[in-house]
DNA sequence: CGATGCGTTGATAACTTTCAAATTTAGTGG
DNA sequence: CCACTAAATTTGAAAGTTATCAACGCATCG
């Protein structure tokens, strides 16, 4: 038997990509059949900052969609390190599993409102409504691609990882060139497989190179996207 | 826009897990509805060592199953490095994509025979036969988990990665405690995100610790599985 | 038998982590 | 609202890990 731990699934529903600087609307403004259905069928729950939404190994009976705030999924490795599986912003769907149990835990990064829907209800709906089924299928494909992109990311240098993270967040959480980060440096480090010090130093380095500005630790302004893209490889 | 390259999907069909040392039958001996159907519907093709089976960005109109030999999928990164996506042994299915194009290239590691089936034919069959549909779904879930396990692997040390690789191969390509590796050190290095020298040195280190023996470079004998498992985390 | 490819080993350099401390920011009670 | 305390972030120095560059050994094959 492989001693590998089970691994969870979290899926982002952003099928609509924002053009850079195109809009200051949060991603949550998107509308699609699946999201609408979840809104209809589900209950809204509020989670205070740092509270647990679900735990690893709990039954994966529900699927979640972020209304406001932000969420992280994570797993504690056997050596005590934490690996962050993903960040979920308004509009994003998370907690959808192929297996019977969650393979990541989920916590609110900031105070968050989340729509909770029975997984059964969604899969049943997908059975009846081909459009929903297609959306679920597409969601799965995007999730697979997202995880595979992570694999490609994790073989790169610290600078490349941070650059890639900034570009990803710029696409998802930016107003113009300004990114508001809901998560801490520790969250970012655990997402990128780096230490908090390396993340901090890398950001400082990018700032020295006038590629970014860091007016406050949670706010980052992109000054030179093409330089970041080059770093990203 | 994210400059991320598209990412491909390759799925292993080994639903039947061998117990360690339980059997010297190759994994390809497995039988299941999907594999049988592919055998029926598909054509067998032979590929010489190092020949291309399909290329990145080609239309993903076919799905493949290894009959004999072994296959690697890979992608060339913008900096020229090669990232190996996975190794496929007899019985394994690869090349199944969610998107319209392959996002990895595939090559025969050794001379290989492969069953090739139209993707359409499989998805159509899955529509008619719920058992096939369930198998495809399960396959997707396993693939997602496999990629997520890679993410967890890639944040670990070189020793942990190599140990994990050996345990994975022991499960898939071993007769008792002896693993016959079809792939080169370079293949392993590109799979684990390490250099060939680091892989070699790590194996030498494990040999010094009498955790493994390396009678020839392509043959590895596990002498202390529990030590490997501990390294694996 | 020499050329060639693959793997191993050695020395050094580059990068990232670790440990420690200083600094800034955020949260809380008065 | 301010002061105080705790938490988060940044910075510095040293240690550890892995990559890079180079050379050597070994087997295969013409």
Image: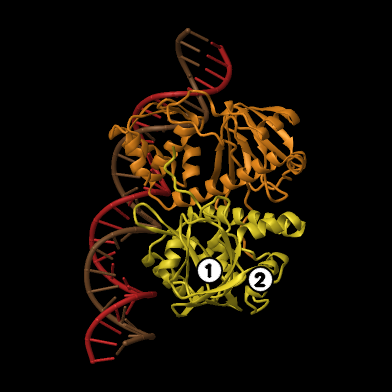
Chain colours: A orange, B yellow, C red, D brown
Screen quadrant of the N terminus of chain B: top left
Give the Cα separation between the discs numbered 1 and 2: 30 Å
Q: Quadrant of the C terminus of chain B?
A: bottom right
Q: Is residue A96 left or right of residue A18?
A: right
- The secondary structure type at the circle numbered 1 is helix
Q: Residue at x 64, y 79 (%)?
A: B24
Does the image show residue B45? yes
> Residue at horizontal 63%, vertical 73%?
B28
Q: Earlier in the sequence, mark 1 or mark 2?
A: 2
Q: Which residue is mark 2?
A: B39
Let me know if marks 1 and 2 both belong to one chain. Answer: yes
Residue B138 visible to the viewer: no
A154 or A223: nearer the viewer = A223
Badge 1: residue crowd in 10 Å (few <14, some 14–19, many ≥20): many
Q: Disc 1 or disc 2, which is closer to the eye? A: 2
Q: Nearer the viewer, residue A46 or B46?
A: B46
Q: Residue at x 41, y 60 (%)?
A: B194
Please count the marks in the image: 2
Q: Which residue is identified by label 1?
A: B166
Where is D14 relative to B61, above or below? above
Q: Quadrant of residue B14?
A: bottom right
Label 2: chain?
B
Q: Which mark is residue A61?
A: none
> How many residues crowd around disc 2 within 10 Å: few (fewer than 14), some, or many (20 or more)?
some
Residue A198 shown left or right of residue B180 in the figure: left
Residue B106 image offset from top left, x and y in percent: 48, 64
């Amino acid at each position: 038997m492989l001693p590998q731990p089970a691994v969870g699934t979290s899926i982002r529903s952003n099928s609509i990509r924002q053009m850079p600087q195109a809009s200051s609307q949060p991603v949550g403004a998107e509308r699609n059949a699946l999201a609408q259905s979840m809104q209809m069928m589900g209950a809204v729950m509020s989670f205070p900052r740092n509270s647990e939404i679900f735990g690893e190994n709990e039954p994966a009976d529900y699927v979640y969609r972020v209304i406001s705030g932000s969420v992280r999924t994570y797993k504690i490795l056997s050596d005590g390190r934490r690996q962050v599986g993903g960040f979920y912003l308004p509009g994003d769907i998370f907690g959808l599993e192929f297996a019977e149990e969650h393979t990541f835990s989920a916590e609110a990064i900031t105070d968050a409102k989340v729509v909770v829907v029975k997984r059964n209800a969604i899969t049943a709906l997908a059975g009846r409504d081909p459009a929903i089924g297609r959306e679920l299928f597409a969601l799965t494909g995007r999730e697979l691609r997202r995880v595979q992109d992570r694999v490609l990311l994790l073989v790169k240098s610290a600078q490349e990882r941070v650059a890639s993270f900034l570009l990803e967040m710029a696409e998802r959480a930016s107003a113009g060139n300004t990114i508001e980060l809901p998560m801490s440096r520790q969250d970012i480090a655990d997402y990128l497989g780096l230490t908090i010090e390396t993340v901090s130093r890398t950001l400082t380095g990018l700032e020295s190179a006038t590629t970014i500005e860091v007016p406050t630790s949670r706010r980052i302004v992109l000054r030179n996207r093409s330089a970041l893209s080059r770093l990203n490889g």
